[in-house]
Amino acid sequence: MMATRNIEADEEMIRVPEHMLMTASKVRREVLARASDNGLVQSSAWRLSEHQALVYWTYDQRSKLGLSVWDTYVNTLPRDFSSVPLYVLSGTEPASSLSVNTDAEKWVAEHLPHSVLLKVTEQQERLFNDWTCTCEVLTKFNIESPVDWRRYVWAWLVVNTRCIHLGRHTTGNQQSAISSQPSSAVFQPISDRDSMALAPMLDLLNHNCQARVSTYFDTGRRQFVIKTLRRYCKGEEAFISYGPHDNGFMLAEYGFALAENPHCALELDCKVEMWISTVKANLNTRRARATIKSTDVDALVDVLKQHGLWGDFTLFSGSAELPYRLQAAMYLVFAAMKPGAGIKGVISQWERWQRGENTSVSEEVDLAVKNWVSRTCSEVAEHSSKLLDNIQAKQNDDARGSECLDPFLVHCIRLIWTTINKIAIESTSL
């Protein structure tokens, strides 16, 4: 979207009237009205979440294209989501697990970073659960359930990539809801419990990491409002921000990655978990000299979870030192690996370290942690370099006209691995 005039900071740049917002409460009223026509009114049987309700509505609108007042909006939506990994891996039939049968599916699954593949796997489980719940609820209302899995996947991604969050509900100083609108559910007021909506045009706003906006639903004017916190000149493109996310999240959720993303990071959660498993295996086979048991390692992990320090082990480009979460987790386990260490003493020592007190083993453990990170990052750098070579070969094959995926998806996967490779190389010397 382009600014048609100068827009000042703290000025409302977009207002969407209530009747142009499709929300779960409107979908519910629509379905209940249809159920009433069928002689079935069981409002207590409505068990769809907001996301599920909007997905069903989107699916239904696509099914009756040409007969709906929302045709214009539906026709502006993408025909497919070929750059979104879930769209490629969701299969042709309803399933809770990803489909990795075709060559294209296998290639995507093999070249997505582990953290991204995990996220897509979770999406598939939610997608299948939403499909199942929707079919069960609609059956109770004697309304035809979705039957086309690929169309449902499309509708699910429409909502996932395009729904807006209504933000706080604030009261303006202008007129209240317009009561003279037609009785159709589309024109009825939204509910205070609605937190998300679909709206025409708003998906034309592109993402920019530097965009600064505030959003809210004005209950006085009955409008969804986007207010910019920075100035735009006439002819300049106006942006919103999808949030401070790395490229892996952006690709999984929205189907794109950014060449310049300040939030990119190298996630080491999988590497840490694999290392913990190795430590426990060594303890069980008595290959380690430590006096603790593998169950003690589980107890240390529980301590980290209790302190909110388990997971999100990430390295960022340009960092001069190891992030605190990674230091805290690995310090605790490495200290426990010392010969003669006891679980209580290790935890006490770790707590003193947390308070910033020097201990007799801090420097030794700190060196062990840095060596582990250096080794791990070297492995990641080598692995990512090989994958980048494979991706380049894939792009060359596709350019020669062989069976190919969406080139933009391949490009985005390459961007992610390029960033991972860069951060891994930088972090070997931390």
Image (cartoon, rainbow, N blue to C red):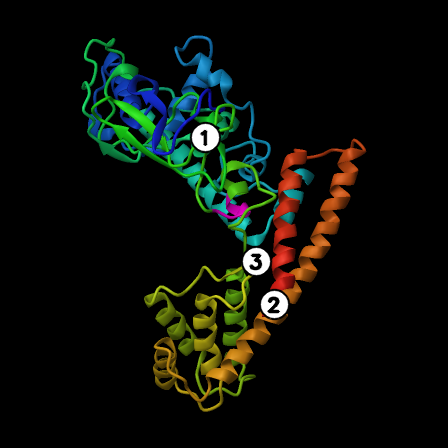
**Residue 52 image-quadrant placement:** top left
Q: Is residue 275 above or below residue 97?
A: below
Foreground mark, 1 or 3, reads 1
Q: Secondary structure at mark 3?
A: loop
Q: Which residue is mark 3?
A: 317
Horizontally, residue 331 falls left or right of residue 394, namely left
Query: How far apart, in angstroms, are the residues tagged by discs 2 and 3?
Result: 16 Å
**Residue 367 percent coordinates (x, y):** 55, 80
Q: Secondary structure at mark 2?
A: helix
- Identity of the amino acid at label 2? Thr
Span of residues in magenta? 245-249
- Identity of the amino acid at label 1? Tyr
Mark sitting earlier along the chain (1/3) = 1
Magenta stretch: includes residue 190 = no
Mark sitting earlier along the chain (1/2) = 1
Q: Which residue is mark 1?
A: 232
The C terminus appears in which quarter of the rendering? Answer: bottom right
Q: Are marks 1 and 2 in contact (CB under 8 Å)?
A: no
User: What residue appears at the point 34 percent right and 84 percent down from the top-left corner?
Assistant: 344
Q: Which residue is mark 2?
A: 376
- Identity of the amino acid at label 3? Ser
- Of residues 92 and 4, the one nearer the viewer is 4
**Residue 216 image-quadrant placement:** top left
**Residue 39 percent coordinates (x, y):** 22, 14
Foreground mark, 1 or 2, reads 1
Mark sitting earlier along the chain (2/3) = 3
